[in-house]
């Protein structure tokens, strides 16, 4: 898809830490029309970089501009619902960065509104657009890993929490989104979340989330913003093999596969493993693929990979995780029928 095939009819709301990356990619794709931010200094910083586009402090101006058909929201999470709702009510297509909203109820309302308005509503769960994740999904579908047993997600950093007050909400949406996709044919049976607040009761600096699916599949997600060394790693163990996706490594070292087997013979476990095999992946920026996917979905009026219903399901898990952390209990989901995840 060449940039000239996309219309220059997209407005970006928020040009902060992540917004600047969205601006670069949507401009490269020829779609960026206007940047909106409530901070004049943020806008002034980018006027020299993008002299060919418009800048405004007024979101109302964006809404009233009939030449703007698409809105990308990169504002703080607590603003997502109102910004998206106003845009959807006018029939505009919307891309929302994670987290989709402040809770599942708000997310569900946006999902229903997008259906009513026949608008495209996509959530920025970027992992689905990563070449390594694409290969992992292909390998799972092809049976290379056998039956899934365990998935372990680590997303650790020092700082970079953004406006969120919880490491769970700041970092876990990406991993929850990918986990639900990899276990799409399974039922989520229970989950338990434990959080730690070391420096202030207002902030949850560290979170562990344990999830149990049908077919005896287990998953763990560990996130925090107090780790001295950044880590973004996914380990998937199956009955025939295991794979590690280490996103902080170079492209030739991000993905490693081990062929493995474990057998019980005469009461003794026998472990067999071949040497790890590096999986070479095409070098391609996931964000660029994600932005292009949004534009193409709008052009063809097709459902995005990370559509609003996918976003709602992620929000449901986040809500349940927060309930578990606050009650310090493991939640059995058969008692939460209204929160069960269904496509």
Image (cartoon, rainbow, N blue to C red):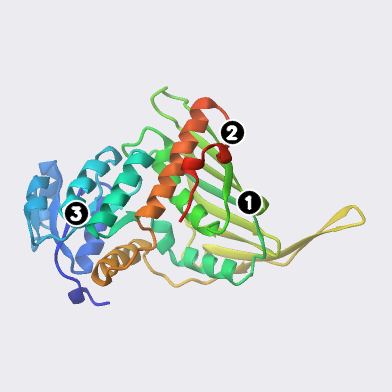
The disc placed on residue 245 is none
Disc 1 target residue? 214
Residue count near mark 3 (Cα–Cα under 10 Å), binned few <14, some 14–19, many ≥20: many
**Image marks 3 and 1: residues in contact by CB distance under 8 Å:** no
Looking at the rendered image, the disc whose residue lies closer to the viewer, 3 or 1, is 1
* Residue 226 visible (yes or no): no
User: Relative to the observer, which residue lies in front, 242 or 181?
Assistant: 181
* Residue 47 picture location, percent across and down: 10, 55
* Residue 294 picture location, percent across and down: 29, 64
- Upstream in the sequence, badge 2 or badge 1? 1
Please indicate whether residue 337 sits to the left or right of residue 7 in the image: right
Check disc 2 and report its element: helix, strand or loop: loop
Q: Residue furthest top?
A: 201
Residue count near mark 2 (Cα–Cα under 10 Å), binned few <14, some 14–19, many ≥20: some
* Residue 84 visible (yes or no): yes
- Residue at left offset 12%, top offset 48%: 43
Please indicate whether residue 134 sits to the left or right of residue 256 in the image: left
Instruction: State the separation of the CA atoms marked 2 and 1.
Output: 16 Å
- Residue at left offset 88%, top offset 53%: 268
Is 143 rendered above or below residue 216? below
Check disc 3 and report its element: helix, strand or loop: strand
Check disc 1 and report its element: helix, strand or loop: helix
- Residue at left offset 54%, top offset 64%: 255
Disc 3 target residue? 12
* Residue 177 picture location, percent across and down: 45, 52
Disc 2 target residue? 330
Please indicate whether residue 311 sits to the left or right of residue 325 in the image: left
User: Relative to the observer, which residue lies in front, 109 or 9?
Assistant: 109
* Residue 198 picture location, percent across and down: 47, 25
């Amino acid at each position: 898809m060449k940039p000239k095939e996309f219309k220059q009819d997209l407005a970006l709301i928020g040009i902060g830490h992540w917004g600047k990356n969205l601006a670069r990619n949507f401009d490269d794709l020829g779609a960026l029309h206007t940047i909106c931010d409530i901070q004049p200094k943020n806008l002034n910083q980018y006027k020299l970089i993008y002299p060919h586009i418009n800048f405004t402090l007024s979101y109302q101006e964006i809404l009233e501009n009939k030449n703007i058909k698409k809105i990308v929201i990169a504002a703080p999470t607590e603003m997502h619902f109102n910004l998206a709702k106003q845009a959807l009510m006018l029939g505009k297509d919307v891309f929302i960065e994670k987290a989709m909203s402040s809770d599942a109820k708000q997310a569900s309302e946006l999902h229903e509104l997008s259906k009513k308005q026949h608008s495209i509503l996509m959530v920025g769960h970027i992992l689905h657009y990563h070449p390594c994740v694409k290969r992992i999904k292909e390998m799972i579908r092809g049976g290379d890993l056998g039956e899934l047993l365990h998935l372990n997600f680590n997303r650790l950093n020092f700082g970079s929490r953004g406006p969120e007050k919880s490491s769970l909400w700041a970092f876990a949406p990406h991993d929850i989104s990918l986990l639900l996709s990899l276990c799409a044919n399974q039922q989520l049976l229970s989950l338990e979340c434990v959080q730690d607040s070391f420096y202030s009761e207002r902030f949850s600096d560290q979170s562990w989330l344990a999830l149990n699916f049908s077919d005896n599949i287990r998953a763990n997600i560990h996130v925090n913003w107090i780790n001295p060394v950044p880590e973004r790693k996914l380990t998937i163990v199956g009955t025939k093999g295991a794979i590690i996706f280490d996103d902080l490594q170079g492209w030739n070292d991000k993905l490693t596969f081990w062929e493995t087997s474990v057998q019980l013979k005469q009461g003794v476990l026998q472990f067999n493993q071949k040497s790890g095999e590096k999986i070479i992946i095409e070098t391609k920026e996931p964000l660029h693929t994600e932005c292009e996917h949004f534009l193409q979905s709008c052009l063809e009026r097709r459902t995005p990979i990370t559509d609003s219903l996918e976003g709602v399901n992620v929000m449901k898990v986040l809500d349940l995780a927060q309930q578990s952390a606050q009650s310090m209990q493991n939640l059995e989901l058969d008692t939460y029928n209204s929160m069960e995840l269904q496509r």
